[in-house]
């Protein structure tokens, strides 16, 4: 019963709804507590090995179920941190139980010899009881000028502030790179890729995730079989392709080859040569300046192409319908299905093929 002013009103509480709300509240609090505990447990390494006085030049890390981090960030004390948790939903394991499982089921080592750091955790048994398996992750802090060879079958890989040859692979996690210079080759079978502020020779592939690349230069190769591409501030010899996602790019400079079998392409602030194709989407490309050539091939979507008005270009544009706004600098032939001629006296070749409609403008 509830009294409001001089009016009395009966308020009935549904016991089932009340019980459900109470249950959800308890569940939320329990989950939050478990998450907080897991985070606190993750902050405490099972083992820390100092690398002070060791001239580490090469880093080899191999783990069967955890993540790998290698950092050359200045100001960090050289060391290896090992984080171990239970894989069966119970991350809170006593050190004695962890040591027992390591001894019984894993070949585990962390050592340095002749400038080589080896950190590994490999299963001894092919049919190990999953309830007794462990998630073993490594964080390595070393001087920035090192080479790495990294492999994990189930976790993510993080690299930052390194110079040298980096080779790494994960079967089920994501790749995260920041401030890497050198030869970079990374593979993941099921995760996303994030690469920032890196240069020289970049070769990254994923079988099932998206790729994000920002502020990178040099020879860049990016490939995904099932995700989208997000590119920003790339300069150099660039090839970025996807078999099933969309492509977005901004501020691309150099030579750019891109394509998708199942999505659209949206590119802005281009100062490059371009070879772009899609089998099932549209293409939008806006140029500040054109490099040696532009080639666009669209099987089932529309093309919106914006070109710089003061640059000399040769135009060869064909589609079911071509709508062109070229200004006074154009000389040639123009009809509803084709534009062929020169803009500002001619120059780089612009070749467009589309099955539907092409909108062509200069400004």
Image (tube, rainbow, N blue to C red):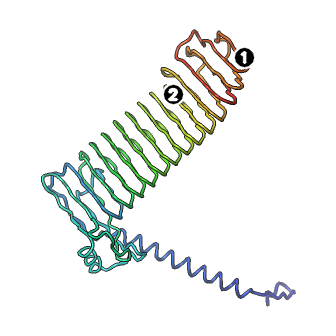
**Quadrant (top left, top right, bottom left, bottom right) of the N terminus:** bottom right
Quadrant hosting residue 313: top right
- Image position of 26 (left or right of 151): right
In this view, 242 is above or below 34: above
Q: Residue drawn at (54%, 18%), measured in percent from left and top?
A: 349
Q: CA distance from mark 1 to mark 2?
A: 25 Å
In the image, farthest residue toward the front: 127
**Quadrant (top left, top right, bottom left, bottom right) of the C terminus:** top right
In this view, 171 is above or below 315: below
In this view, 40 is above or below 155: below
Helix, strand or loop at mark 2: strand
Quadrant hosting residue 197: top left
Spot occupied by residue 310 in the image (x, y as percentages of width and height): 58, 16
Please give the residue where the numbered disc 1 appears in the rendered image: 335
Report the front residue among 134 and 15: 134
Please give the residue where the numbered disc 2 appears in the rendered image: 274
Question: Looking at the image, is mark 1 or mark 2 nearer the viewer?
Answer: 1
- Image position of 196 (left or right of 249): left
Q: Residue drawn at (70%, 26%), measured in percent from left and top?
A: 320
């Amino acid at each position: 019963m509830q009294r409001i002013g001089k009016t009395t009103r009966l308020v009935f509480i549904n016991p089932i709804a009340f019980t459900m709300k109470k249950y959800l509240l308890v569940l939320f609090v329990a989950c939050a507590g478990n998450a907080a505990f897991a985070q606190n447990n993750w902050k405490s390494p099972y083992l820390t090995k100092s690398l002070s006085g060791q001239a580490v030049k090469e880093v080899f890390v191999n783990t069967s179920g955890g993540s790998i981090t290698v950092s050359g960030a200045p100001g960090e004390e050289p060391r290896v941190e090992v984080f171990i948790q239970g894989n069966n939903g119970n991350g809170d394991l006593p050190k004695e139980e962890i040591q027992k499982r390591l001894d019984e089921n894993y070949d585990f080592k962390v050592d340095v010899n002749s400038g080589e750091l080896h950190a590994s955790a490999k299963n001894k048994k092919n049919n190990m009881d999953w309830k007794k398996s462990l998630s073993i992750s490594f964080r390595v802090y070393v001087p920035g000028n090192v080479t790495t060879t990294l492999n994990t079958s189930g976790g993510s890989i993080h690299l930052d502030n390194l110079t040298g040859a980096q080779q790494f692979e994960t079967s089920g996690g994501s790749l995260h790179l920041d401030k890497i210079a050198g030869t970079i080759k990374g593979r993941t079978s099921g995760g996303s890729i994030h690469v920032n502020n890196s240069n020289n020779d970049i070769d990254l592939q994923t079988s099932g995730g998206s790729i994000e690349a920002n502020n990178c230069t040099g020879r860049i190769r990016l490939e995904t079989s099932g995700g989208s591409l997000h590119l920003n501030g790339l300069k150099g010899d660039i090839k970025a392709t996807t078999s099933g996602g969309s492509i977005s790019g901004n501020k691309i400079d150099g030579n750019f080859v891109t394509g998708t079998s199942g999505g659209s392409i949206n590119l802005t602030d281009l100062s490059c040569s371009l070879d772009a194709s899609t089998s099932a989407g549209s293409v939008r490309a806006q140029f500040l300046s054109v490099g040696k050539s532009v080639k666009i091939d669209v099987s089932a979507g529309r093309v919106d192409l914006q070109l710089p008005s003061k640059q000399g270009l040769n135009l060869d544009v064909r589609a079911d319908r071509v709508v062109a706004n070229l200004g006074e600098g154009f000389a040639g032939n123009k009809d509803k299905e084709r534009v062929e001629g020169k803009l500002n006296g001619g120059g780089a070749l612009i070749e467009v093929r589309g099955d539907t409609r092409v909108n062509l403008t200069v400004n």
